[in-house]
Image (cartoon, rainbow, N blue to C red):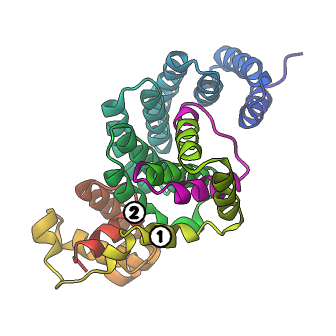
Amino acid sequence: DEPPTDVLLFAGQFCTTLENPAAEGYLKAAIASANSTDNAIALAEANYYLAFAERNAGRFSEAKRRVHIARAIFGAVPVPWRLPVADYQLGVLAFATGSLQEARQLFKSAGPAAEGTGNHLISSMSGSFRALIHCEEGDPGKALGTIVTQIGDIERLGHPELQLLLDTSAVVAAGLGQHELAAEMAGAAAGTGLPWIPPERSVFERSVRNTRRVLGDTAYAQAWAAGHRAPPARLVRAFSGIGVVSAVNAAPATIDVAAVTGLTRREAEVLRCLSDGLSNREIAEHLSISPKTVMVHVVRVLDKLGVENRTAAATFAIRNNFV
């Protein structure tokens, strides 16, 4: 007998995580099973994970088609928290095909939307890809600004988002001519134990080749090994050393955040709470409003400031003397 849909889906997801080629067979079987039983959620999930297998194989157009199928189902069922996840994947696929403006818009919307549902992984990874877009456009300085908004939150990142952040930081450092730091960041990223996957793999490989060419094999290996041994949190100090994080501490007088940003009085209060590192529950208690209302305000703050996550909003506020 054919295994149940959920078993096929789990096997496909597991094999996709391991980049095992058996994933495609399991997921196509799960799609057939989900269709025969009218299991909409399983159908969406199977198409979504099959898009990963297509992406890993470099079949970006087919991967995009699969994500669009999944997104349409997630929107109809509805499963709202899955929509920014799908938009993030569409952004990755747009990046893969060189559609950088489309990718930028997708990451810009996916990051805050994911943060609003508590999905910090998608929020963080959207920021890393936006930095890669800046690098691909020849603006590593702007990429550095994007990275800096994330590194204060580095301790809470899981391996996938940490690996992407560190490898992206290596690309940014190389673009700024900081090749030893780039090699160290590449070594730190390797410490997560995760492989590079398309499409970012080609960007990382190109950056490593350039850095190795500039430093020479011996110096590159030494810097890589030093980064591999170092705790990832040293990224903060490393980027501070090239003059950006320290700028967050520069100081004139506090200015009226609402007047400059267009935030409402309540949204400005929420931003100040974010800058103090408060959680949604703590903000709710401090302002005597519900956690659900706090979440709505946070999403609006992120949208108006044009940032991906609460850490980026706090950094933005501090850097611009809003608090």
* Residue closer to the observer: 46 or 124: 124
Residue at the spot 65% in from the left edge and 62% down from the top edge: 227
Where residue 269 sits: x, y (%)?
26, 76
Where 92 falls versus 261 (above or below)? above
Asked whether the beta carbons under mark 1 and mark 2 sit within 8 Å of each other, the answer is: yes
- Residue 130 falls in which quadrant of the image? top left
Q: Which mark is residue 149?
A: 2
Residue 119 seen in render:
no
Where 19 falls versus 307 (above or below)? above
Q: Amino acid at mark 1?
A: Gly
Quadrant containing the C terminus is bottom left
Per the rendered image, the range of residues in magenta is 175-203
Where residue 22 sits: x, y (%)?
79, 22
Is residue 158 highlighted in magenta? Answer: no
CA neighbours of label 1 inside 10 A, class few (<14), some (14 to 19), many (20+): some
Quadrant containing the N terminus is top right
CA neighbours of label 2 inside 10 A, class few (<14), some (14 to 19), many (20+): many
Disc 1: which residue: 152
